Image (spheres, helix red, strand yellow):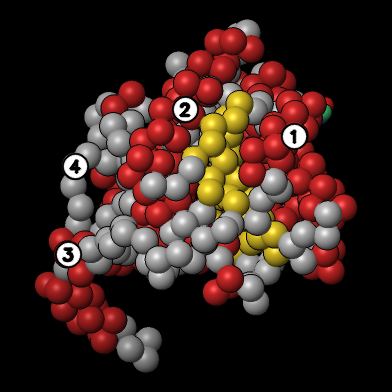
Amino acid sequence: RFCCSGSAESLRNKIHVYRILDRSCAVLRSGELPQSKFFKPLEDAMLPAGSFNNRVAFITGGGTGLGRAMTTTLSALGAQCVIASRKLDVLQQTAGEISSRTGNKVHAVQCDVKDPQAVSRCVDQMEALTGLPDVIINNAAGNFVCPSERLSPNAWKSITDIVLNGTAFVTLELGKRLIQNQKGASFLAITTIYAESGSGFVVPSASAKAGVEALYKSLASEWGRYGHRFNIIQPGPIRTKGAFSRLDPTGSFEKSMIGRIPVGRLGQPGEIANLAAYMSSDYATWMSGAVIRLDGGEYLSMAGEFNELRRVTPDQWKMMEAMIRSTKGS
Ligand SMILES: *[C@@H]1O[C@H](CO)[C@@H](O)[C@H](O)[C@H]1NC(C)=O
């Protein structure tokens, strides 16, 4: 009963519920594999203090989840942040909390990224508040799980509107104004590991995220001459607060997800935030057109044909070795 028909409003509610699945993402409360003790996350800001002094960062979907984590890190490193989404109350609360922690200004600007006029008004507002940004992070997204034979055109449109149109409208609007003002900037898009492979049951999201990657790779080539860099982070499953209970009530999906992550645990928002900060910083000015996967090894572990052999025990290997030897020369 995850999907797929119904009014735009009920669809929006479902998208809200399943937004946590975005970037294939989200969540565990419980188990980690034993090897996770080798891979403890460090989440505090990695770059030197002040790395973003006198910089303005614009983060879509900045009120919650990864967007909130990236805003926190950039703000802690000295950036003046502008966060945007549809929900002004959520944004304002996040802005207040982050700003009181870091001592740097965080502005909340309402913006429905799927509406180009709204994006334009949002950028007007930002220009008045902070001037044009030095750092742009396209993070806003929506997603839900649904067998594709149950997808309505409206379901398709809701996701592609936010993810692909939204990223395009924000990027084009800011890009044009930055070019006009001869101002350089770093653009970052948060996609997902399945933007590359595709994935069943999240087909609108997979398609739209793949489109976002094509958009960013294309502009990396075209707009370098204007001082613009374009890069992409593909997060694997990230531990965010609460979350999965309604998606995975039995916890079985969660367990199998952990089981295929070589590092033995989910990611933490601060780990994505540190990578995003580095890629958006002046330490990374030689980086453009890069696609960086941060997933604890999950993607390759799902791809390698023989990787399931990790379940074979030493005793079973002994038996198998004997069997292999006995077939030698046959
Ligand atoms: C955005 O994408 C949808 C397809 O999902 C399309 O129908 C729509 O016209 C696009 N453009 C605008 C301006 O919304």
Query: Could you tell me which residue is drawn at 55 percent across and 10 percent down?
Result: 10
Mark 2 touches mark 4? (CB < 8 Å): no
Placement of the C terminus among the 4 image quadrants: bottom left
Kind of residue at badge 1: Asp
Residue denoted by label 3:
37
Please provide percent x and percent y for residue 322.
20, 82
Instruction: Look at the image and tell me whether residue 233 can be seen.
Output: yes
The local crowd at label 3, few if under 14, some if 14 to 19, many if 20 or more residues have their Cα within 10 Å, is few
Q: How far apart are marks 3 and 1 (CA)?
A: 48 Å
Mark 4 vs mark 1, foreground winner is: 1
Kind of residue at badge 2: Gln
Q: Distance between the residues labelled 3 and 2?
A: 37 Å
109, above or below 302, in the image: above
Residues 229 and 183: in front is 183
Please provide percent x and percent y for residue 229.
70, 64
Query: Could you tell me which residue is drawn at 87 percent across and 52 percent down?
Result: 180
Residues 44 and 65: in front is 44
The local crowd at label 1, few if under 14, some if 14 to 19, many if 20 or more residues have their Cα within 10 Å, is few
Q: Which mark is residue 30?
A: 4
| Of pointers 3 and 1, the one earlier in the residue sequence | 3
Q: How far apart are marks 1 and 2 (CA)?
A: 18 Å
Q: Which mark is residue 92?
A: 2
As helix, strand or loop, the secondary structure at mark 2 comes to helix
As helix, strand or loop, the secondary structure at mark 4 comes to loop
| Of pointers 3 and 2, the one earlier in the residue sequence | 3
